[in-house]
Image (cartoon, rainbow, N blue to C red):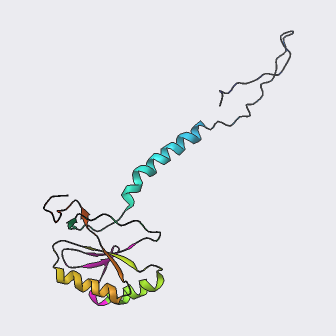
Amino acid sequence: MGAGVIQREGGGGRGRRRGRARPMSEINVTPFVDVMLVLLIIFMVAAPLLTVGVPVELPKTAAEALPSEQEEPLTITMTADGSVQIQTSEVPEADLIPRLRAIASERSDDKIFLRADGAIPYERVMQVMGALNAGGFSSIGLVTDTGGPRLDGRDG
C-alpha cells in the first residue's frame, strides 16, 4: 500500500509540455481496515453482555463443570420466591409438565439443567425434578457454583 503518487504523462525533460495527471488506480483500504477493527472491538466487548439469565444464588460445590454440547442447553430456574422459569419465561406449576412435553418433542437431546436457589427446600427441588422427568427429560444436570466446601473439610 503505497501513498497515492500521481504520475504525469509526457516526455522526459525536453520541452515544456504540460502533461495531464492520470488518476490513481489503487484502492485505499485504510478506512475499511479502521472500520473493521472498531467493529471487532465493539463485538468483543458486547459479546459477554449478551448472556441473559435470571439472578439466582446458586449453592457452591467442588464438582467440575460439564463439557459443552452442540445444542443450546435448556435451563429450568427455581428462584427464591418459588417461581419456576423455563429459560427466562415464568411458567405456572400447572403448565410445567405440558410445556416440557412440547419442548421435549422438538428437541433431539433429553438433557436439561436445573438451577435452584440455595434457599429452596430440598423437597421442592425434588418435586420439580419429578416434573422434569415426567415431561420427558431423563438427563437432569444440577447447576452449582464452583469453589464450595469439600467433604474433607477444606474450602475449594
Residue 69, horizontal then vertical, whole percent? 44, 68
Task: Give the quadrant of the C terminus.
Answer: bottom left
Vertical side of 42 occupied by 63: above or below: below
**Residue at x 27%, y 65% (from the top left corner):** 63
User: Left or right: where does residue 85 sit relative to residue 37?
Assistant: left
Q: Is residue 108 magenta?
A: no
Question: Hey, which residue is sitting farthest front in the picture?
Answer: 152
Give the residue furthest to the left: 153
Pick the front one: 13 or 42: 42
Relative to 147, 138 lies left or right: right
Residue at (37% x, 85% y) in the render: 100
Question: Residue farthest to the top?
Answer: 14
In the image, residue 86 lies in the stretch drawn in magenta = yes
- In which quadrant will I find the N terminus? top right
Q: Position of residue 131 (x, y in %)?
A: 30, 87
Left or right position of 70 against 126: right
When asked about the image quadrant of residue 17, the answer is top right
Please provide the residue range marked out in magenta: 73-94
| Number of marks | 0
Which residue is pictured at 35% across the width and 65% down the height? Answer: 52
The residue positioned 42% from the left and 84% from the top of the image is 104
Q: Observer-nearest residue: 155 or 24?
A: 155
Query: Quadrant of residue 96 in the image?
Result: bottom left
Quarter of image, res 75: bottom left
- Where residue 31 appears, as percent x and y from the top left, is 57, 38
Percent x, y of residue 84: 27, 79
Residue 136 versus residue 7 in the image, above or below: below
